[in-house]
Image (cartoon, rainbow, N blue to C red):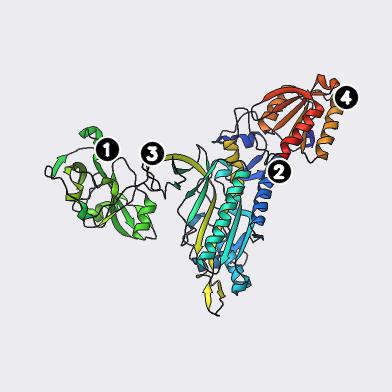
Amino acid sequence: MKQSKLLLSTLRESPSDAEVISHQLMLRAGYIRQLAAGVYAYLPLGIKVLQRIQNIIREEMDQSDAQELLMPAIQPIELWKESGRNEVYGPELMRISDRHNREFALGPTHEEVITSLVRNEINSYRRLPVTLYQIQTKFRDERRPRFGLLRSREFLMKDAYSFDTDWEGLDHSYRIMYDAYHRIFTRVGLNYRAVEADAGAIGGEGGTHEFMALADIGEDTIAACRCCEYAANLEKAEANQQVPTSTDYNPQVLADLEQIHTPHTRTIEELVQFLLVDSRQILKTLLYIADNAPIAVVVRGDHDVNEIKVKQYMNAETIMLAELEQVEQSIKSEVGYIGPIGLMIPILVDASVLTITDGIAGANVANYHYRHVNVARDLNLTHMGDFRNVVEGDPCPRCEQGTLQLHRGIEIGHVFKLGTKYSEKLSATFLDQSGREQAMIMGCYGIGVSRILSAVVEQHHDDQGIIWPMALTPYHVHIIVISIKDDVQMELAKHMTAQLEKNGVEVLIDERDERPGVKFKDSDLLGIPYRMVIGKDAINRNVEWVERIHNSKELITADAAIQRVRENIMQQ
């Protein structure tokens, strides 16, 4: 491909609204262009990378006996009402009406559609199991699109769905997809972890794993053991902490509770400074509204409440932090002075606070706290458990010697065991061997295809630009002709291109009438793995060989360069 003919415009400076490096570099290198907030066009270089990602995904899906189909992006809203997710998805679901005022949604995901499709196509156990997948554009009305392709309103996704006759079959289908995802993310060149996760809005009755690309700008936090393979999303991560029962205590009797005046100490930091205590001595009590009923959650002062764990413990549909008015109405207290002692509502006590024998807690009176709190003596311990986020250095829940380390990650894939969540509601059933009607057992498996593009750039770049892994690069070789007016240089460039393309190597030739410095900067920005610079030494059939990953330079013969490319590509 001649670079002069390519739809490509590079930018010397990063756009002011591009916050992360992947967004900046893909805009500067001419891979994408923004049409509106969270909506992007893929230019020729960008679509080539996207197609390479899709090809890898298709190869692994097909190898796993999954069958490709393509479902409509426009979905009747009745299906969402049938599944019960019409309200759950809320404003992120893009809704439209046709000229007859019939309501539709632009699909953010396709559980309802695939279940509806399969229920009409399969009615016997003889046609199960089956796994179906598609690669298609999805739509979500993000409140705040940001980070380029990482959080956008329109994005490309691979979603697959398995249908089995029993849970054992689902476990098998899940493992096949789980293993395929490992191969996919390894092939695209990502440093990633598979972590235990919460099912979120997709829901389900079984296990779920997220695949996270490690990156400092990731919106998710991962807790991973330093010694074993345990890894989990922060929402799901646990620490190795025993939860004793009330009969296990032999509380050390300290001083009696004392109510002390603590003016203007609404935060943990203010209380620490006022009383000169360690935050680990403080019982942090937060009031939540779970399904319209108030509950209190108590964690140590240096810890944060994990709302997902609280929601699951309460088996609640919704949970939210109480507003000021709700605090005053429910417990007659003020925010900043809430404490667990004397509350007549359910109190969830995290295991980390159970050993506190001389603590500080709110007195439920403005400007006052209790001191000398002994948790075992002074609190109602009916509801004890794991209600906090793990922190760096917590003991691993899976091995004896490991501790947890926190990382930031970008979610690039998610696999779910849905069970009968959708098949029962949408009546996707089959007749078993005895002729009895049974609900299909489902699994769901998603990959953010366009997200992979951004995640790879986040991990593969330097100060000059992108560094594509060979599996994703838009072109394998970038040939730069220093002087297009030099017939010898142009003849050698054409010869090398012909030889390379004969062997399946994709070549981009920079034969623009530009200064060498401009060409080199653009080449660094584009990130093509191998560069061959044809200059004055072309008369001796020598070229400058440059490997983008470390920008090393070497003068070699044209034939040696061609052979080196062949060997390197064959090793991929």
Judged by depth in the image, the label closer to the viewer, 3 or 4, is 3
Q: What residue did someone put label 2 on?
A: 48
Q: Position of residue 349 (x, y in %)?
A: 27, 51
Q: Position of residue 547 (x, y in %)?
A: 69, 29
Q: At 59% across and 33% down in the image, what residue appears?
A: 15
Kindly identify the amino acid type of the residue bearing the numbered disc 2.
Lys
- Which quadrant holds residue 560? top right
**Earlier along the polypeptide chain: callout 2 or callout 1?**
2
**Earlier along the polypeptide chain: callout 3 or callout 4?**
3
Kindly identify the amino acid type of the residue bearing the numbered disc 4.
Asp
Mark 3 to mark 1 CA distance (whole Å):
16 Å
Helix, strand or loop status at disc 4: helix
Q: What residue did someone put label 4 on?
A: 487
Helix, strand or loop status at disc 1: helix
**Earlier along the polypeptide chain: callout 4 or callout 2?**
2
Given contact means CB atoms under 8 Å apart, are the residues at marks 3 and 1 in contact? no
**Earlier along the polypeptide chain: callout 2 or callout 3?**
2
